[in-house]
Image (cartoon, rainbow, N blue to C red):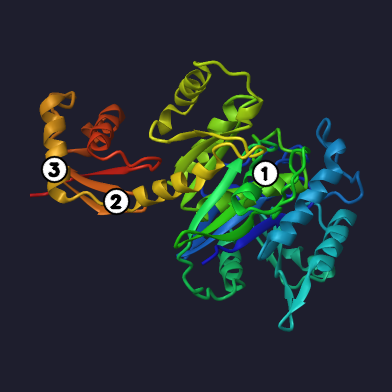
Amino acid sequence: MSVPIVALVGRPNVGKSTLFNRLAGEPLAIVDDVPGTTRDRIFTDAEWNGIPFRIIDTGGIDPSGGGKEPLSIGSADFIEEIRSQSELAIQEADVVLFITDAISGITPADAEVARILRRSQMQRDGKSYPPILLVVNKTDNSTLRSGVGEFYELGLGDPYAISAVHGTGTGDLLDALVATFPPQIKQEEDTSVKIAIVGKPNVGKSSLLNRLVGEERAIVSPIPGTTRDAIDTHIQVGDIEVTLIDTAGIRRRGHVTPGVEKFSVVRSMRAIERADVSLLVIDATVGIGDQDAHIAGYILEAKKSTVVIVNKWDAIVKDDYTMAAFTERIRQDLNFMAYVPVLYISALTGQRVDQVMPLALQVQEERLVRLTTSQLNRILQAAQDEHAAPGHGGRSLRMYYGTQVRSDPPTFLIYVNDPKLCHFTYTRYIENCIRKEYNFIGTPIQLVMRPRHD
């Protein structure tokens, strides 16, 4: 079931980022009194009364290109891009929170934003979609709250008076928000293996998709950022159904072209989340960089399995040591994913492309492997005998018992005397000991330490 998307939109400096942080429960967005501070849209997961949703913060819309308030240095150059970002967020959102400012009252920019929002709505089952909730922020005292009635002029229904700084009124707003969510209809289970093709722009993801599918299913262009949406393609590999998910290229925040490409990052992250295996495509002519490692971190955070695909290998001048040196560099830069296999291909010529799907499906099988309890406890005992955990405060970690509580990904529950005594380096050591018994190729494993209560 998909998680509802909630977009926060409005002109600059009405408190969108402050509200975003309030709903997220942590300071994820930069907050500044100077209008135009937020240019990059960011997103996070939140919940209210057990109902999950995803929030997208946007740069402020200033349709006039000016406004009463001065923009921060250089922000005027971003007005159209910020407006484009916000309109794209509206298109993607299931619900829109239109944020206004009680101190400034209704401005011409607010009226224009309201017009943009109303224009963006569609009629579905006799209702306007997406729903728009009008939020009047900065109502920090009774005088400001008493003036909220003027916002009915915007024609967007009842205004919700809140103070994002102090949190007042946000409970009523969230109650109204979750009430707009459509009922979650359980979809028919898709049993296909889902494989996402991810990476920076212009590394050859769409070319690889076309090779795997055997036809020109995705547009191929040398211009970075051609693929905007996550595209699902269903294929049959032997008797296994596979869903290939091609995604837009991911760039580091601040290096993402404002507008359509920026919103493609959100879609790419959603593709990683719903995939079983991610093919992380790297451009051999450029080499692995910080952003490749950044994307790998996204995949690891989502606890997905990974295959590193080094594309454009045909364009490299090689000797007997080139592949080994390139692999060593990958191992160094992705040292937090030492378990991932690396495959060198050329989507252009087809070199080794026939090995991609067998390897990806092998990695998927690794996600489902279960070790017996006796196997695991034998590993844990041998690990402690070979290298006891270092002590702290006169106490040492003792592992009493372990069991695999789930697969997909493999998760191991280990009962210990005190989880605080388990340093992350020793956790890594235990993981390596498990992988010596069974490699779990391309797949992250989770170790959960729990105190044993006699």
Instruction: Say which residue label 2 marks.
Output: 369
Looking at marks 1 and 3 on the same chain, the residue that comes earlier in the sequence is marked by 1
Please, is residue 34 above or below residue 314 in the view?
Answer: below
Q: Identify residue type, mark 2.
A: Val
Q: CA distance from mark 1 to mark 3?
A: 46 Å
Question: Horizontal and vertical percent for residue 11?
Answer: 80, 51
Q: CA distance from mark 2 to mark 3?
A: 16 Å
SS at badge 2: loop
Label 1 vs label 3, nearer the camera: 1
Q: Quadrant of residue 111?
A: bottom right
* Residue at 91 percent of width and 44 percent of height: 66
Give the image quarter of residue 432. top left
Q: Residue 55 falls in which quadrant of the image? A: bottom right
Along the line of sight, the residue nearer the viewer: 377 or 57: 377
Q: Which residue is mark 1?
A: 207
Q: Which mark is residue 287?
A: none
